[in-house]
Image: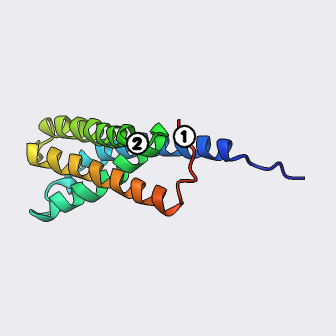
């Protein structure tokens, strides 16, 4: 007979999966960004939209991994997006044809905030049934 999964175990599994997603995203950006095809992949201004959407996912995953809500969740989303985005921008300094920019980092931060907003809406749609620390 299958053992029932408790809500607490499910939430722990989601947090672990989200943390792994943040780590995997950072690895993909690091390895993929070093490939020659990454140079000019998204022309301006579409590159900022790519940053916004990519880091909304990364920031949202960081917020889920933190298992918090309110301003703490917002802080987790923003910190996750800025940490991965900052590492990506520093990495680009050393890559031929790539360049780091504050505008890209700002788009990453905006993406983190968008991820936080998406999590807040999801929490509200679920009727606040999620248990947080």
Label 2: few (<14), some or many (≥20) within 10 Å?
many
Which tag, 1 or 2, sits closer to the chain's start?
1
The answer to whether residue 17 is left or right of residue 71 is: right
The answer to whether residue 48 is left or right of residue 15 is: left
Residue at image point 13% right, 58% down: 40
Residue at image point 34% right, 47% down: 59
Residue 100 image position (x, y, % from top left): 11, 42
Q: Mark 1 to mark 2: distance in Å? A: 10 Å
Furthest residue in direction front, as rendered = 127
Mark 2 secondary-structure assignment: helix
Residue at image point 29% right, 43% down: 81
In the rendered view, how is the structure colored?
A: rainbow
Q: Is residue 56 visible in this depiction of the protein? A: yes
Q: Quadrant of residue 46?
A: bottom left
Task: Give the residue pinned by disc 2.
Answer: 62
Residue at image point 28% right, 35% down: 83
Residue 8 image position (x, y, % from top left): 66, 42
The answer to whether residue 44 is left or right of residue 66 is: left
Residue in the foreground of this view, choosing between 1 and 94 = 1
Residue 45 image position (x, y, % from top left): 10, 63
Task: Give the residue pinned by disc 1.
Answer: 16
Q: Quadrant of residue 31?
A: top left
Mark 1 secondary-structure assignment: helix
């Amino acid at each position: 007979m299958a053992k029932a999964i408790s809500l607490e175990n499910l939430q722990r599994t989601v947090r672990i999966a989200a943390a792994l997603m943040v780590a995997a995203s950072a690895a993909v950006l690091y390895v993929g960004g070093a490939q020659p095809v990454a140079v000019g992949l998204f022309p301006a201004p579409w590159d900022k939209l790519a940053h916004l959407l990519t880091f909304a996912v990364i920031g949202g995953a960081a917020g889920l991994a933190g298992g918090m809500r309110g301003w703490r969740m917002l802080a987790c989303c923003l910190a996750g997006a800025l940490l991965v985005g900052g590492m990506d921008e520093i990495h680009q300094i050393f890559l031929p044809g790539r360049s780091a920019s504050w505008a890209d980092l700002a788009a990453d931060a905006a993406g983190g905030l968008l991820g936080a907003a998406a999590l807040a809406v999801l929490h509200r749609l679920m009727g606040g049934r999620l248990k947080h620390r």
